[in-house]
Structure formats: structure tokens, C-alpha cells
Image (tube, rainbow, N blue to C red):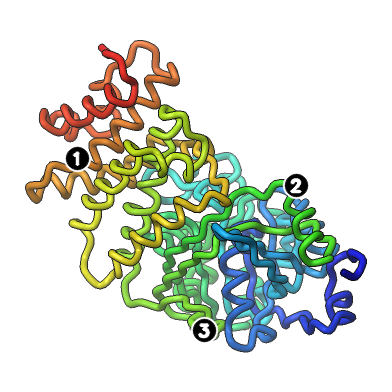
């Protein structure tokens, strides 16, 4: 094999691989491992990928931008299947910048050729309050609303502003687009939020209203919001991944990403200025996103939560470990049965469940349970409670949901985070109505006692 060389477009060309820098027509906020395994991969596999380059902005850290910049935006995507790895250099990111470079964001959005903004900023990045609108008690939100409200009406250059929130920066960029007359644009939230397009629209509207009436009117007329459901397990990359890439490909890559072979992307909405042909990479465009969101939330995410709580109590560390445990596997299958009964037809549910099981069983994707278990109470309220309520309302026993909630209760009790708490206390915290249902509460308690294998108060 040729001696290892730093990854770059010129080095690729020298070895006969043509990956020229694509024209920037998309902006992405939140360049991390998931974006590079998902939206950037889909863009690289769309028809005519050279026409749709991405300008990516990082979140809090500039490290990813620096690493990508050092190798012309290129990185190796390692698809880790049960039987081996597949290595692919992805070239759809034309440039990466630190998130605070509002001047670069404003310049990109001020160009008519820029047609799409995608976001993977995590739920925390939206800085929403309990009502789903920007949290005005958040000091960063309050500061950005004040900044935009003072600077924009005074005619300040949006590129010179320094908002600290992602959405504040995005709205400054949209003001730059309004001033240049660059035309309509699509904003595409790719975060795991129910009604992600609606939440993004509301948040952008709040920031635009604070900035100026002119911007608010322009946003309502020129900005389209696209709803999505995204799915591709992308665990944290270990330092040894760069060594694996070097040994397999001969490239010295400081920004590789590891992911599973499976990927899924469902979108609903309009792209008034055009978009890549993502359907060429099997993305799905639908009229309504909600059924697809619920399919993923209840089946994939719900099962992940169940495993993350029950698995450690059964001596497991990863998803693959946990799904091999008989109690966990049966509980997942019961949870899926509950969810499938409450989902509409037309979602290819039988095939999806088979795919999910194969993904969970993949021993070479080290998807750690302790990472999935973070913020467990919020997750079970979103992923399990709605299914339990619907199952009980339609005459079911919601056994899978009861075992999932029992796993969270047992995990909480075992962690001694809640000294003196009882099973009833914790179930009531999840959902008061479910706690008052005697039969359902008994099923939860049975699961708790099984998992802890000892009597509890």
C-alpha cells in the first residue's frame, strides 16, 4: 500500500479520485458526527452532488471546524456492519467554520444560490421553554432578543453582530438575506423533536419579531420550514478509528465518523429555492411527517430507553449486550407490539421491526446504554407514556409500556438518586393518570421487582 498521506482533495486527485470542492448552496448549523453520517452523506449520494456543497458551522467548539478545514472538508465515513467495515470519503462539505462566524453565515445566506439551511443543534440548542417557544428567562435568549431588537432597526450590519444563540445567529443571517433580496429559502430541522418544523418556525418567528416588523413580514413570506424524521445510529468515535482508517485506506484522517449501515430520512415540506435530489439516496418525501416521527419515537427511541434502564440492571453495557438478554428482548418486543397497534398502516412496520432488531444486535456498534439513559424521565414521557395511554384507552393491557416504565423506575431506585422514593411516587412523576390505574400500576411494579429482584417499599 502507498505510504499514508494526509487526506485532502489534492491528495485524492493524485491517486485518481475526483472529488472537487462543490459549490456552496447549503448551510448546516451543528456540524458533528451525526450530520456527517446523515445529511452530508445523503447529499454526497444525491444526483449531481458537486452542485450542492455544504458550508458547515460548529456548535460550541471550533475543534471539528479546524479538523475538517485541515483536510478540505473531507472525512472518512466508516459504516460498521456485523461482518466488517466499509470506508468512504465524503466530499459534500465544502467548508467548515466555527459557530461564532456570523459574518460567514450572513455572507452565505445573502447569496441567492444558497437554497437550504439544515440544523442538528440538539434539543438544548433551541433553548425553548415549557410552552415550546424561546425561553425568555434564558440569559442568552434574552440577550439576543435585545441585541436584534436594538441593532436591526438601527441599520446595523447583520454580519457584524455577535448573537450567542444558534437561532439568534440564524436570524441575523436571514436579515442579511432580506437586505440582499436573495429570495426564499428552506429551513430544515433534523433534530429529534416532535413537530421540529413547527417548533423551529415558532422560534424563528419570535426572534424575527424582536428584530423588526420588516424582517418578521419577510420571514413569514419567504422562509419555508421542512419537517423531518432522521435515523442513523452514530456512536461517539474513539481515537482508534483514525488508526483503522489509516490501515484500511492509507489516509491520515483526523475527522473520521463511524456509523451503522442503516440510514433513514423522511421529509415533508417545500423547498422554494431548490434542493439536492436526496431521493436518489433513498430519502423519502411525504405529505405528513407525524406518523413517521411516531414510528421512530415509539419503536426505535422507546426501545432504546427501555434497554438503557433495564440493561445495566441485567449486567449489560451496550445496546447489543442488552438485546441479547432474554428479559430485555421480550420487553422490547412487547413494547413494539403496543406501539404498532397504535400506529397507522402504510409505514412498513413489519420490515422496520426486523431492521431495528438487526441494528440492535450489531455487536460492532458500541452504543453505550449510559449515554442513551441521560434525561430518562423526559424521554419516557415522550416515548412511552403516549403509547400507554392509547393502548389503555383502546382496551389493551399496555404490558410493554408498563415494563418500559418499570425499567425506568427500577433504574432510578437502584441508583439511589431518589432516597426514600417509592414505586408509586416515581410512576406518579411520570404520569399521574397512569399511576392511578391500578392494573397498569401493578404491571409496572411487577417489572420493577423482577429487575431489582428484591422487595421494595
**x then y, percent, for residue 77:** 67, 64
Quadrant of the rendered image containing residue 443: top left
Q: In this orientation, which residue lies closer to the viewer: 257 or 271? A: 257
- Say which mark, if any, is on residue 280: 3
Q: CA distance from mark 2 to mark 3?
A: 33 Å
Q: Secondary structure at mark 3?
A: helix
**x then y, percent, for residue 103:** 75, 65
| In the rendered image, the vertical position of residue 284 relative to residue 273, given as above or below | above
Q: Nearer the viewer, mark 3 or mark 1?
A: 1
Q: Is residue 397 left or right of residue 367?
A: left
Identify the residue under disc 2: 239
Confirm whether residue 209 shows in the render: no
Q: CA distance from mark 2 to mark 1?
A: 42 Å
| In the rendered image, the vertical position of residue 398 relative to residue 243, given as above or below | above
Quadrant of the rendered image containing residue 415: top left
Q: Secondary structure at mark 1?
A: helix
- Say which mark, if any, is on residue 455: none
Q: Earlier in the sequence, mark 2 or mark 1?
A: 2
Q: In this orientation, which residue lies closer to the viewer: 415 or 195? A: 415
Q: Is residue 62 left or right of residue 398?
A: right
> Crowding at label 1, few (<14), some or many (≥20) Cα neighbours within 10 Å?
many
> Crowding at label 2, few (<14), some or many (≥20) Cα neighbours within 10 Å?
few
Identify the residue under disc 1: 399
Q: Residue furthest bottom?
A: 48
| In the rendered image, the vertical position of residue 395 relative to residue 17, given as above or below | above
Q: Secondary structure at mark 2?
A: loop
Q: In this orientation, which residue lies closer to the viewer: 270 or 364? A: 364
Amino acid at each position: 500500500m502507498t505510504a499514508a498521506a494526509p487526506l485532502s482533495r489534492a491528495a485524492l486527485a493524485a491517486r485518481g479520485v475526483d472529488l472537487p470542492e462543490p459549490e456552496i448552496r447549503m448551510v448546516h448549523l451543528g456540524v458533528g458526527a451525526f450530520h456527517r453520517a446523515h445529511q452530508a452523506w445523503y447529499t454526497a449520494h444525491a444526483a449531481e452532488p458537486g452542485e450542492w456543497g455544504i458550508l458547515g458551522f460548529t456548535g460550541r467548539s471550533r475543534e471539528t471546524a479546524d479538523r475538517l478545514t485541515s483536510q478540505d472538508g473531507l472525512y472518512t465515513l466508516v459504516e460498521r456492519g456485523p461482518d466488517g467495515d466499509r470506508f468512504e470519503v465524503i466530499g459534500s462539505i465544502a467548508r467548515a467554520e466555527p459557530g461564532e462566524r456570523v459574518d460567514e453565515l450572513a455572507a452565505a445566506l445573502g447569496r441567492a444560490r444558497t437554497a437550504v439551511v439544515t440544523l442538528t443543534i440538539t434539543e438544548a440548542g433551541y433553548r425553548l421553554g415549557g410552552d415550546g417557544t424561546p425561553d425568555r428567562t434564558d440569559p442568552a435568549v434574552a440577550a439576543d432578543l435585545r441585541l436584534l431588537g436594538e441593532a436591526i432597526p438601527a441599520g446595523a450590519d447583520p454580519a457584524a453582530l455577535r448573537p450567542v444563540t444558534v437561532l439568534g445567529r440564524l436570524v441575523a443571517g436571514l436579515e442579511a438575506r432580506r437586505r440582499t433580496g436573495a429570495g426564499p429559502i428552506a429551513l430544515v430541522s433534523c433534530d429529534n423533536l416532535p413537530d421540529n418544523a413547527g417548533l423551529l418556525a415558532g422560534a424563528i418567528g419570535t426572534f424575527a419579531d424582536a428584530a423588526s416588523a420588516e424582517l418578521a413580514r419577510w420571514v413569514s413570506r419567504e422562509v419555508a420550514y421542512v419537517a423531518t424524521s432522521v435515523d442513523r445510529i452514530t456512536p461517539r468515535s474513539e481515537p482508534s478509528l483514525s488508526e483503522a482508517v489509516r490501515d484500511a485506506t492509507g489516509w491520515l484522517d483526523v475527522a473520521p465518523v463511524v456509523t451503522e449501515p442503516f440510514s433513514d430520512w423522511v421529509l415533508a415540506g417545500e423547498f422554494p429555492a431548490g434542493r439536492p435530489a436526496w431521493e436518489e439516496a433513498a430519502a423519502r418525501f411525504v405529505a405528513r411527517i407525524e406518523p413517521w416521527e411516531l414510528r421512530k419515537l415509539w419503536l426505535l427511541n422507546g426501545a432504546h430507553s427501555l434497554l438503557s434502564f433495564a440493561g445495566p440492571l441485567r449486567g449489560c453495557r451496550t445496546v447489543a449486550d442488552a438485546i441479547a438478554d432474554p428479559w430485555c428482548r421480550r420487553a422490547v418486543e412487547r413494547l413494539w407490539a403496543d406501539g404498532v397497534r397504535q400506529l397507522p398502516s402504510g409505514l412498513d412496520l413489519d420490515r422496520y421491526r426486523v431492521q431495528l432488531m438487526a441494528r440492535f444486535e450489531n455487536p460492532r456498534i458500541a452504543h453505550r446504554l449510559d449515554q442513551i439513559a441521560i434525561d430518562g424521565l423526559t424521554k419516557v414521557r415522550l416515548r412511552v407514556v403516549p403509547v400507554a395511554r392509547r393502548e389503555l384507552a383502546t382496551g389493551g393491557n399496555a404490558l410493554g409500556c408498563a415494563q418500559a416504565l418499570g425499567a425506568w423506575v427500577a433504574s432510578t431506585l437502584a441508583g439511589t438518586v431518589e432516597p426514600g422514593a417509592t414505586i408509586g411516587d416515581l410512576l406518579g412523576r411520570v404520569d399521574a393518570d397512569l399511576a392511578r390505574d391500578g392494573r397498569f400500576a401493578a404491571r409496572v411494579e411487577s417489572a420493577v421487582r423482577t429487575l431489582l429482584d428484591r422487595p421494595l417499599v
